[in-house]
């Protein structure tokens, strides 16, 4: 543990974060707190678990590691990945863990967000009890980094500063991290991946139309910043020495809800960064990662299309990235468009500037952009819920100016767009001057969930996606001079996609009845692509 620790009876004070350990045996009285103005309802449909204890891992049979047939067309290049390139796979707790009502976890936004008619996050892949076996399977394939998330609602069931810490959760993730290290891999930890504690969201805000993003994660709550920083300090106090890479927020724009939500995320992230590097003297890397399907002008020779694409990028990235990476003000387009927007003052800009060691991006695909039909300014002045283009005020599509799709389509929003991807890496590096970390990328093959098992495992379109994107990373590094820190494949197995199991991003198949995992061809192809291009080979 980092920092000075004073052990008292049932109380630990560490690195500026107060902790009172709470075990989940017996009934503990809930701490008294101010009653919320509108208390959310905690009703969950009846369900049952198949597991209630960690499963002992077994070695992966050699029969599962037999190489699949190779593709006829394979990338040919003469580039190797530079030393220190971070190669790994990723997953998130809400999408794989299950066990949502076990071992002290309290409700998160995601239990209420998904309608009762759709699959919930109650069980998913039961990784909470199968993590040792899942780590064994990743290590057997040669994975070097495993990126996962730690749920706030497990560590702090009552969420707020001064409330008890769940010792079972602390011990669980301590063992998970140790298991990753013992398997010869390195852990990457994300602090918040959409699964905000439900208490931050008043019941009326579950249905209100957001000013920005798609959902309400409660970031705009007046207590959010202090509560998140307290939670993050607890994670760092326990795990900072074992984890070399930290991510504060996953894709915060999607759940930001309004201007205040984004502003709170920017400030909370900066506080965590300063605590990690200035107070704990952490020697690893800490950053933040964003969603953004690169906005490219539909007609690059049309100035209004270029302006629309620039606006799209400002609203998607500049909102966060201007102050964090450049020490610059929120974009003018944001300040003029977003209700309640306010500029950062000089002191804030100085404090926030440079608070990320890498630029995390989840660049799954690209978006073709053109101006709103009524014009950007007219659209930006219409804040009503009926204005579907607000606040971006641009048309977003997946066909180019000649009517062709931008790439081969998946079952969801992802298209195979390696050329745009390379352009995007160049844009990020030259705009924000920070090493680019491809923190998620992946491809849900069209109709895969409806295929026979053998056909699901022979997932050539996914192999093409990964090979083409990885080859463009190499070109970006050597031909464009871009500093690409690494790349993480999403996801290391099929998971719960927020009410959906048909959009399968995984490089492993999961049997939803037995929880058995199966390697897909793309897993072998991706590992082979990387391993044959590492300088040690």
Image (tube, rainbow, N blue to C red):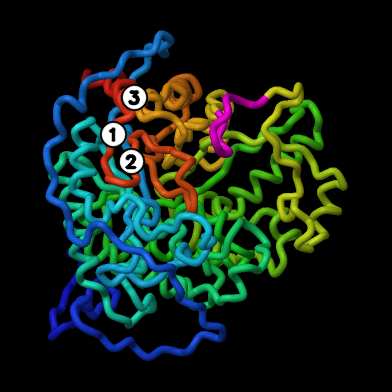
Q: Position of residue 54 (x, y in %)?
A: 17, 56
- Where, by quadrant of the figure, is residue 69 drawn? top left
Q: Position of residue 177 (x, y in %)?
A: 21, 52
Spatial CA span between label 3 and label 2: 14 Å
Residue located at (53% from left, 69% from top): 218
Q: Position of residue 198 (x, y in %)?
A: 46, 71
* Residue 168 can be seen in this image: yes
Query: How packed is label 2: few (under 14 Cα within 10 Å), some, or many (20 or more)?
Result: some
Give the quadrant of the C terminus.
top left
Query: How packed is label 3: few (under 14 Cα within 10 Å), some, or many (20 or more)?
Result: many
Q: Which residue is mark 1?
A: 518
- Where, by quadrant of the figure, is residue 215 drawn? bottom right
Q: In the image, which disc is placed on residue 521?
A: 3
Please state the extent of the stretch shown in magenta in the rendering.
405-415
The image shows residue 11, relative to residue 246, as above or below, that is: below
**Earlier along the polypeptide chain: callout 3 or callout 2?**
2
Q: In the image, which disc is placed on residue 510?
A: 2
Image marks 2 and 1: residues in contact by CB distance under 8 Å: yes
Give the quadrant of the N terminus.
bottom left
Question: As rendered, which of 43 and 150 lies closer to the eye?
Answer: 43
**Earlier along the polypeptide chain: callout 2 or callout 1?**
2
Magenta stretch containing residue 149, yes or no?
Answer: no
Helix, strand or loop at label 1? It is strand
Residue located at (43% from left, 56% from top): 193
Query: How packed is label 1: few (under 14 Cα within 10 Å), some, or many (20 or more)?
Result: some
The image shows residue 259, relative to residue 408, as above or below, that is: below
């Amino acid at each position: 543990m980092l920092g000075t620790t004073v052990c008292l009876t049932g109380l630990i004070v560490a690195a500026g974060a107060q902790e009172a350990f709470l075990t989940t045996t017996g009934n503990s009285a809930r701490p008294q707190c101010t009653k919320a103005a509108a208390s959310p309802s905690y009703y969950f449909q009846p369900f049952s678990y198949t597991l209630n204890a960690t499963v002992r891992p077994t070695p992966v049979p050699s029969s599962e590691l037999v190489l699949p047939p190779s593709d006829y067309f394979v990338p040919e290049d003469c580039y190797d990945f530079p030393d220190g390139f971070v190669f790994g796979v990723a997953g998130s707790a809400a999408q794989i863990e299950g066990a949502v009502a076990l071992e002290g976890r309290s409700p998160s936004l995601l239990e209420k967000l998904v309608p009762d008619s759709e699959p919930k996050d109650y069980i998913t892949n039961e990784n909470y009890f199968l993590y040792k076996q899942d780590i064994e399977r990743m290590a057997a394939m040669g994975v070097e980094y495993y990126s996962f998330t730690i749920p706030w609602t497990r560590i702090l069931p009552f969420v707020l500063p001064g409330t008890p810490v769940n010792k079972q959760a602390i011990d669980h993730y301590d063992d998970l991290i140790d298991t990753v290290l013992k398997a010869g891999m390195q852990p990457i930890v994300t602090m918040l991946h959409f699964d905000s504690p439900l208490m931050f969201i008043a019941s009326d805000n579950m249905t209100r139309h957001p000013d920005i993003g798609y959902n309400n994660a409660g970031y705009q709550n007046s207590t959010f910043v202090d509560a998140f920083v307290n939670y993050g300090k607890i994670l760092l106090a326990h795990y900072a020495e074992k984890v070399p890479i930290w991510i504060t927020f996953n894709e915060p724009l999607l759940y930001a809800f309004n201007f205040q939500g984004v502003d709170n995320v920017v400030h909370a992230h900066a506080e965590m960064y300063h605590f990690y590097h200035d107070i704990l003297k952490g020697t690893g890397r800490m950053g933040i990662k964003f969603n953004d399907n690169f906005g490219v002008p539909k007609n690059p020779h049309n100035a209004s299309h270029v302006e629309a694409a620039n606006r799209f990028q400002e609203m998607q990235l500049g909102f966060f990235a201007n102050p964090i990476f450049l020490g610059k003000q929120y974009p003018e387009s944001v300040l003029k468009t977003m209700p309640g927007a306010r500029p950062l003052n000089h002191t804030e800009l100085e404090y926030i500037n440079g608070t990320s060691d890498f630029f995390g991006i989840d660049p799954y695909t690209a978006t073709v952009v053109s101006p709103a039909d009524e014009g950007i300014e007219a659209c930006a002045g219409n804040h009503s819920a009926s204005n579907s283009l607000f606040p971006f005020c641009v048309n977003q599509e997946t066909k180019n100016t000649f009517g062709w799709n931008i790439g081969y389509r998946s079952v969801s929003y992802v298209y195979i767009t390696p050329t745009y991807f390379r352009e995007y890496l160049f844009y990020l590096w030259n705009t924000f001057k920070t090493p680019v970390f491809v923190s998620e990328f992946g491809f849900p093959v069209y109709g895969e969930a409806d295929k026979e098992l053998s056909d699901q495992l022979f997932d050539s379109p996914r192999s093409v996606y990964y090979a083409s994107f990885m080859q463009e990373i190499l070109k970006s590094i050597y031909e464009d001079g871009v500093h690409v820190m690494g790349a993480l494949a999403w996801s290391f197995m099929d998971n719960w996609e927020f009410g959906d199991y048909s959009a399968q991003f995984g490089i492993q198949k999961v049997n939803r009845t037995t929880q058995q995992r199966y390697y897909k061809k793309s897993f072998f192809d991706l590992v082979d692509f990387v391993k044959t291009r590492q300088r040690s080979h």
